[in-house]
Amino acid sequence: MRTLLTNRTFLRLLAGRLVTNAGDSIYYVAALWLVHDLAGSTVYTGIASFLVMAPGMLQFVVGPMVDDLEIRWVLVVTQAAQGLLVLTIPLAAWLGVLRVELVLVVIPLASLLNLVTYPAQSAALPRAVDRENLSTANAVFNTAHEGVNMAFNAVGGVLVGLAAVGAVGAFVVDAGTFALAILLFLGLTLPERAGGDGRAATADGGTDLGGAPDGDDGADESVRERVDRYTDDFRDGLAYLRGTAFVPVLAPQVFISFAMGMMLAILPAYAGLRGGSGLYGVLLSALAAGALIGSVASARLDWVPYGYWMLGGTALTGIAWVGAALSTWTPAIVAFFALAIVHSGGNKVLFDTLVQTVVPEAKLGRVTSSMSTINGVATPIGSLVGGAAAAVVGPVPVVLSVGAANFVGTAYFALSKSLRSLPAVADVEYGDDRIEEFSGGP
């Protein structure tokens, strides 16, 4: 940890992460509550939640882009574009033309830009720290991520609830975070990395365009050719995943992500049922607090066999969601929401470390983006289903269904001896056959 505190590149990357997290938290709270306020229907909040997450379906394009481009400028440009985009909401309100349709247009565009930010930061991390500090760096990143989310989800809820600010004013505050992030990322420098799979390292720390002929920097490559190349890289990522333990481990997570998407879509309505906009921010903060606890604990739990980590974690999460659905006492609801996300917060650290340890660096961007795409498709679709379902049965049964989904995940791991026998993350090494040549299943 002391080494990380003296690593200026890591600290600047971490500071940028904190600021972008703060802005994203405020944006998310303000956007979904504004849609809920303007439309008054879970169908619309389901659509809004879908649009926030739907760009994740294009993750297969982003991974190779991150491998190709110079990370500093990717971060600067995306932050600037997002800042300008979110300012259209307060501008429309000032002109008296703010409608829910405008918010539903801004949401996916901002999310599409943000789709580049976090993969770029993740791709930069293994270049900013040494291998022996990577697990700790991931834990710090995720701990800081959830800590900021916890604080600024509450801040977003407070801003939305203040008559002098409201959801529209929160977008102005959000734009300020993008400006600060730009200043931080402008000063970011990364060491050169070795290329692979036809990509040669460049002086700016990026890589030249894979697939371009020798002597051609790829500038004349058509859009169709680039899309085809990105698709090939996505397939390359999938090809690597086949036969590895990552596939059976991802399967229940995809199912649970679908259910989580349902819950996120109905959260404004659930909070309105139990307390209002203030409770909405508190519940989002509780989710972030639980993830923070999980992230902190994960640094000391990498010795736990990964299969049993998944088995126990999904069971605990299912119990928590059922408790949240059945409780009417606000402190208990908040506590159950926090408990429900502890395992997810810890698993993000452990799973990211597992992937970064086993997967070759030259394939890391496309493999992680392939997995994110698979997992990312489930959550937005779940939001659409959850919003529509809540309009018929109400938000509480939807929360109960999220708990049931986690119990299905528990059964999945309980019935598979090969999955339960997966090794602890601390015991895994580069190219570990127990992960890469996994032949077991449920």
Image (cartoon, helix red, strand yellow):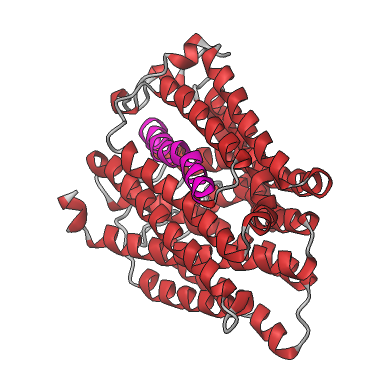
Q: Is residue 442 magenta?
A: no
- Tell me: residue 294, above or below residue 176: above
Q: Residue at x 31, y 50 (%)?
A: 140
- Residue at the bottom extreme of this rendering: 95
Picture residue at 38% right of the left edge, 56% below the top: 147
Which percent across, then down, holds residue 187? 33, 71
Q: Residue at x 58, y 64 (%)?
A: 29
Q: Quadrant of residue 410?
A: top right
Which of the pair 327/281 is nearer the observer? 327
- Judging depth in this view, the residue of 51 and 6 nearest the camera is 51
Q: How many marks?
A: 0
Q: Nearer the viewer, residue 285 or 222?
A: 285
Of all residues shown, which one is farthest toward the front?
A: 329
* Residue farthest along the right direction in this orientation: 392
Q: Find residue 281 and report its horizontal and vertical position in percent.
A: 54, 61
The quadrant where residue 172 appears:
bottom right
On the picture, is 85 further left or further right than 363? right
- Principal SS element in the magenta part? helix
Look at the image and say whether residue 335 sits in the magenta stretch. yes
Q: Is residue 437 above or below residue 383?
A: above
Could you tell me residue 290's position as x and y percent?
A: 43, 45
Per the rendered image, the range of residues in magenta is 331-360
User: Which quarter of the rendering shows the C terminus?
Assistant: top right
Of residues 114 and 169, the one nearer the viewer is 169
